[in-house]
Amino acid sequence: MRTRPLHEHVLETVFEERRRLASRRGFLTGSAKVVGGGALALGLAAAPRLAAAQDGTPAAAEDFFEDDIAVLNYALTLEHLEATFYRQGLEEFDEADFGQDPLGNSIFDFLVDIRDHEADHVETLTSVINDLGGEPVEEAEYDFGDALTDPAAFLATAQALENTGVSAYDGAAAAISDPELLTAAGTIAAVEARHASYLNFVNGTLPFPAAFETPLSPEEVLEIASPFIVSGEVGEPMDEDDEEATPDS
């Protein structure tokens, strides 16, 4: 009799836990409805790229960025997005909304840790850009749709954001000329990968889906992130007029 691999058993347990939580709170209404608004847009855009083989090489990152500060502002744009997502989301939810993961840990507590990591990333990147004489990009205004009202959509969006972030760092690394900055960026990318792995786990997908990560070009990443950004210029410092602007109704 064939013994089932441990990871298959664990993932089955994850699926059952997510179904139980969804049913208990009455928000399991079909996968397309659960992951709504911006979450759906991100998930559909990100999934095929993250799983795709590198058949067509995206535009070289070196051709996209002027210098190391531009790369750091690109990373800061993504970190602002993630940090704001967790900050706003965890103000709307509490521990009971997420329950425990299959290992008995509070999902909410781990999300708080991830939120704090993303805030640290924003603070560090901002400080480094200032130290280099650059102007750090500001936090923009965002619309996360159903992810801020539906715990299942929040977890699905978090998973997509973290996986996209890992591939974004991988795709931009070649454009960094300073070895020390490259090492520093690597330490952030590694933590983002840990976040992605855990969120894959609690969403019922394999934490380590492939032997190699698929880098995403800046164009691909900005295409994924843009639906969430209501105002503010991606990857560049915002003008004062942009900060005061309100989105069209």
Image (spheres, rainbow, N blue to C red):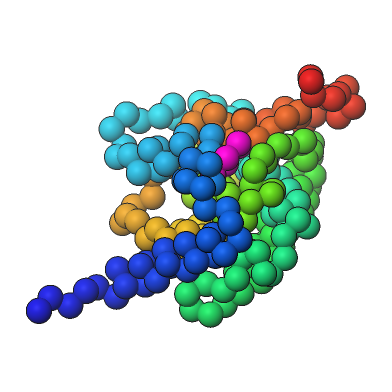
Question: What is the quadrant of the C terminus in the image?
Answer: top right
Q: Is residue 65 visible?
A: yes
Q: Position of residue 39 (x, y in %)?
A: 57, 41
- Of the pair 127 and 239, the residue shown nearer to us: 239
Residue at image point 28% right, 32% down: 55
Residue 197 x/y as whole percent: 47, 61
Q: Main secondary structure of the magenta part?
A: helix
Quadrant of the rendered structure where residue 234 is?
top right
| Quarter of the picture holding the N terminus | bottom left
Of 176 and 199, nearer the camera is 199
Q: How many numbered markers are drawn?
A: 0
Q: Is residue 101 above or below residue 192?
A: below
At x 76% / y 36%, what residue is drawn?
140
The residue segment tinted magenta is: 35-39
- Coordinates of residue 57 in the picture (x, y in percent): 35, 30
Q: Quadrant of residue 132?
A: top right
User: Is 224 within the magenta?
Assistant: no
Q: In this view, which residue lies farthest toward the left?
A: 1
In this picture, is 210 found above or below 129? below
* Location of residue 34 in the rendering, given as x and y in whole percent from the top left corner: 54, 46
At x 54% / y 29%, what residue is drawn?
A: 223
Q: Residue at x 64, y 51 (%)?
A: 150
Q: Residue furthest top?
A: 248
Between 163 and 22, the one nearer to me in the picture: 22
